[in-house]
Structure formats: C-alpha cells, structure tokens
Image (cartoon, rainbow, N blue to C red):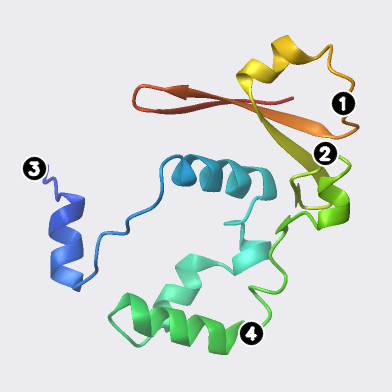
C-alpha cells in the first residue's frame, strides 16, 4: 500500500504556515546549503538521534529545544554575506571560507568589462519555473 500526504495537509496537521519566500530565494538557499554541507551531522548533529530525544510536537518547540541544546549552531553557520569592503572587490558572500560572487548568466557576455573578480563565480539564469545555477 502506498499513501501520499500532501505538504499542505502536513502543514495543516502541524499547524504550520506555508512560508512565503521572495522569488529565487529557495534555490539560492538550497545551493548554499549544498555547498556548505549544512545538514551534515557534524554541522547540525545526528537528526535521527536528536528527533528521538525531542519531547515536543511543533516546529516552534523544536526550534526552542534545538537552540537550547546547540546554542552555537547559528553562530557557527558557514554562510555569510560580504562586507562593504569585500563587495568592492566583487565578493558577494562566503560559503565556508570560500569567497563567491553571484552574477546573472548575461554577465558572461560582458566579461570584457574592466571588472576582475578573483573568486568563484556562481552564474544564474532565470527560468520559467525556477532558476538555473552554474558553478565550478
């Protein structure tokens, strides 16, 4: 037997609002998480063990409980935005300790510009139903 439960139904049963993210935010968050390996046990703990210890039922209870158990988790996150001085060098942010610049795909045709970026460049292309990312 197979049962499919829609996300909407899950959210309703847990009394969770559907998040409303600006366009392209989820794709960039997923890329950043993938590059930083933000869901690895060394970063967040072994979830299969943590969920066994968690006594609550709601997302809000989980957030409170998790931060109490791992107070340094947010501070130790590997993603950060660039400072104004770093932005002047073409750096948009950091993934782990690697500087990255995020540019539209059309930037490739403008590479003859005098701007020189000495960091990893993540190119994005807006698609009809999402965003395409290209990086080395």
Q: Which residue is mark 1?
A: 115
Can you identify the residue that label 2 sits on? Answer: 90
Q: Are marks 2 and 3 in contact (CB under 8 Å)?
A: no
Q: Is residue 99 depicted above or below 45 in this figure?
A: above
Instruction: Please give the name of the residue rendered at 74% of the width and 25% of the height, measured from the top-left corner.
Output: 136
Residue 23 as seen in the image, left or right of residue 124? left
Which comes sooner in the sequence, label 4 or label 3? Answer: 3
Q: CA distance from mark 2 to mark 3?
A: 54 Å
* Residue that numbered label 3 is attached to: 1
Q: Quadrant of residue 23?
A: top left
Residue at the (83%, 38%) spot, across then down: 90
Front position in the image: 28 or 92: 92
Q: Which mark is residue 71?
A: 4
Looking at the rendered structure, which numbered label has been put on residue 72? none
Quadrant of the drawing holding the N terminus: top left
* SS at circle 1: loop
Q: Residue at x 74, y 45 (%)?
A: 92
CA separation, marks 3 and 1?
Answer: 59 Å
Ranked by sequence position, the earlier of labels 2 and 3 is: 3
Does residue 57 appear to the left or right of 6 in the view shown?
right
């Amino acid at each position: 037997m197979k049962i499919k439960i829609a996300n909407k139904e899950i959210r309703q049963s847990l009394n969770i609002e559907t998040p409303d993210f600006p366009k392209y935010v989820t794709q960039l968050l997923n890329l950043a998480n993938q590059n930083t390996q933000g869901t690895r046990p060394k970063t967040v703990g072994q979830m299969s063990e943590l969920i066994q210890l968690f006594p609550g039922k709601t997302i809000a209870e989980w957030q409170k409980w998790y931060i109490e158990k791992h107070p340094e988790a947010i501070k130790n996150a590997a993603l950060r935005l660039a400072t104004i001085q770093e932005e002047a060098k073409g750096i948009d942010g950091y993934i782990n300790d690697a500087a990255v610049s995020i540019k539209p795909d059309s930037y490739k045709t403008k590479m003859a510009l005098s701007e020189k970026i000495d960091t990893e460049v993540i190119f994005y292309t807006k698609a009809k139903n999402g965003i395409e990312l290209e990086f080395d």
